[in-house]
Amino acid sequence: MRLAGWLHPILALLLSPLLPGVINRVKAFFAGRQGPPLLQPYYDLIKLLQKGAVYSGTTTWVFRAGPVVNLAVLSLVLLILPLGRVPSAVAFPGDLILLAYLLVLGRFFTVLAALDTGSSFEGMGASRELQFAVFAEPALLVGLGALARWTNASSLSGMFADLSPAFWGDSLPLLVLLACAFLVLYLTENCRIPVDDPTTHLELTMIHEVMVLDHGAVDFGFIQWAAAMKLWVLGILLVGLVLPGASGWWGLDALAGVVGLLGVAVLTGVIESIMARLRLLRVPQLLVGASVASALALLLTFR
């Protein structure tokens, strides 16, 4: 089974661009239009990776390292993250802490790259990104801690392997709270509605998009690829809570994980089609609510 865990990084690298394609198709369906092809993200990536990059004279190596480090960090995350009920390629006690730190490291270099341009506009987006991260990271750590305590497992693979329909019957309120918290984190970390609108071009509302305005060609391709992989990474945390127990055949379990991720992508498209973006002042309140849900889940583990 451990060898099957190495399939997860390969699947994520190849299939993660499909997730934004599914989201765009769902949004087009709700809008009553044809929309872009399902494989459009792949076409965009191929086109961007074939172009040569142009850099401003005011930027340093930090600007060039940002997209590369973020993509590399997310690739490392895939090694310790299980695909549904398929154990990860690398598992050890406390790897959930490493997961949180790797996500922070990717954000850190993305923000540094934005600040390295010397643009006050990109600095504004970086400031908003870090402000929301302050509220989002505690919700993630507390939620993972609650799941670890309830399953008596200290690794991500052990935590999600113990979840089954029988487990749901004993801890349904806890799992509902964690699912709500992880859904908010998924939308926040991926800069989706209602936290951010990835298609907006309004200066006063842009967060993630404004941080990558000066990146182009192959660097922007890395950013788009990393964004799709982050959809996969945060989505698998949510999928792992709701999938049925392991079937005993890793191929079927891996297929269930991929189907679950596509379902989360469909849910994301539905949310973005029926909701409007929140005001910036309301976003911290939403994230505090996610932290409260994680904290309540942790409290339920002491009963």
Image (cartoon, rainbow, N blue to C red):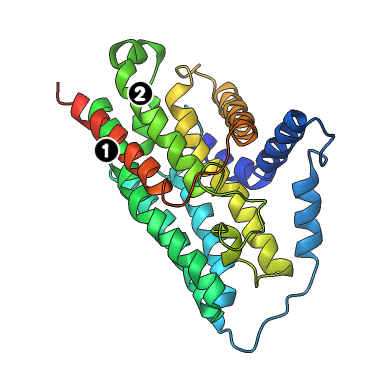
Q: How many marks?
A: 2
Kind of element beneath mark 1: helix
Q: Seen in the image, is 193 located left or right of residue 289?
A: right
Q: Quadrant of residue 257?
A: top right
* Residue at the image position 58 percent from the left and 84 percent from the top: 59
Residue 278 or 81: which is nearer the viewer?
278
Neighbour tally class for label 2: few under 14, some 14-19, many 20 plus, Cα within 10 Å: many
Where does residue 195 sit, x and y in percent of width and height?
50, 46
Residue highlighted by disc 1 = 145
State how far apart marks 2 and 1 are (Cα): 13 Å
Neighbour tally class for label 1: few under 14, some 14-19, many 20 plus, Cα within 10 Å: many
Q: Seen in the image, is 64 located left or right of residue 94?
A: right
Residue highlighted by disc 2 = 175
* Residue at the image position 56 percent from the left and 61 percent from the top: 204
Q: Residue furthest bottom?
A: 57
Q: Quadrant of residue 53?
A: bottom right
Q: Seen in the image, is 258 located left or right of residue 287?
A: right
Q: Seen in the image, is 255 located left or right of residue 127?
A: right
Q: Which mark is residue 227?
A: none
Is residue 20 depicted above or below 47 in this figure? above
Counting residues from the N terminus, which is met first, the one under dot 2 or under dot 1? 1
* Residue at the image position 15 percent from the left and 26 percent from the top: 302
Q: Amino acid at mark 1?
A: Gly
Where does residue 300 sit, x and y in percent of width and height?
21, 24
Where does residue 225 sit, x and y in percent of width and height?
65, 54
